Amino acid sequence: KAGVTQTPRYLIKTRGQQVTLSCSPISGHRSVSWYQQTPGQGLQFLFEYFSETQRNKGNFPGRFSGRQFSNSRSEMNVSTLELGDSALYLCASSLGASQETQYFGPGTRLLVL
Amino acid sequence: EDQVTQSPEALRLQEGESSSLNCSYTVSGLRGLFWYRQDPGKGPEFLFTLYSAGEEKEKERLKATLTKKESFLHITAPKPEDSATYLCAVQARGSARQLTFGSGTQLTVLP
């Protein structure tokens, strides 16, 4: 079974621009979560989607948003990019039941100049 | 607020030298504790899920255990290919599928 895929893998943007990242979950998985990973803050939860609905949101500004489509694929968007948004953005998928494992994709490395 | 603390931050072992990594947690009702392995530039790779105190799981040279306040990842006779950052995360009741991660232990196994 194919794993979680994320596109693009690498991205370079300038301050003030916006960016959209894409995530395709493991086949049959209905929950998609997004995390930001930086050397200083580690892995931090951004938000989770299940059945096209945002179920939970972390402590990030409104510039960070996301959505999920009917086929469970998800996108996250960051508007008005800041230098501090440079990070590895990770997507994780799970079946959608409680108390079960999230499987991570390879991530999208975003560099903001 | 849920918190996860991992120690040590870094660990260097000789090949074959067994050791343990620690993960201390504070959570308002534990739903699950997860161990992941992360190689540089890659996403975390799932290792184990533990749900209740006293539970143990094993995979090859790794064994994870759980108490009410902490979890240990025991590495027996490690090999250089076990070198990676090991991450611990908790999922709290009522938090949907939000994981709170520790900062990780960077393990280096020397040949």
Image (cartoon, rainbow, N blue to C red):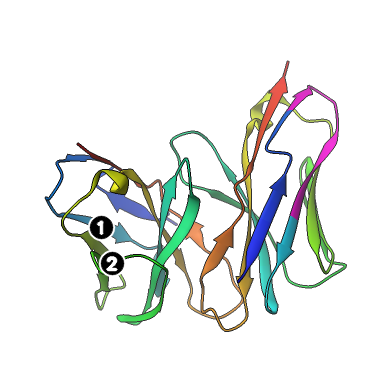
Within 10 Å of disc 1 (Cα), the crowding (few <14, some 14-19, many 20+) is many
The answer for which chain carries disc 2 is A
The disc, 2 or 1, on the residue closer to the chain's N-terminal end is 1
* In the image, residue B71 lies in the stretch drawn in magenta: no
**Same subunit: marks 2 and 1:** yes
Q: Quadrant of the N terminus of chain B?
A: bottom right
Which amino acid, by three-letter code, is at mark 2? Ser
Q: Quadrant of the C terminus of chain B?
A: top right
Q: Is residue B101 above or below residue A53?
A: above
Q: Residue A34 in the image: x percent, y percent? A: 39, 62
- Report the number of numbered marks: 2
Picture quadrant of residue B81: top right
- Decide if residue B95 is in sight here: yes
Q: Residue B106 in the image: x percent, y percent? A: 64, 35
The residue at 62%/45% (across/down) is B104
Residue identified by numbered label 1: A22
Do the numbered discs 2 and 1 sit on residues whose CB atoms are within 8 Å? yes
Residue A54 placement, left or right of B108:
left
By secondary structure, the bulk of the magenta-drawn segment is best described as strand
The residue at 80%/52% (across/down) is B72
The answer for which chain carries disc 1 is A
Please report the bounds of the magenta region as a residue range. Answer: B12-23
Residue A45 placement, left or right of B60:
left
Which one is in front, A4 or B43?
Answer: B43
- Which element is circle 2 on? strand
Q: CA distance from mark 2 to mark 1?
A: 6 Å
Residue B3 placement, left or right of A90:
right
Within 10 Å of disc 2 (Cα), the crowding (few <14, some 14-19, many 20+) is many
Which amino acid, by three-letter code, is at mark 1? Ser
- Decide if residue B57 is in sight here: no
The residue at 52%/63% (across/down) is A102
Residue A74 has which mark?
2
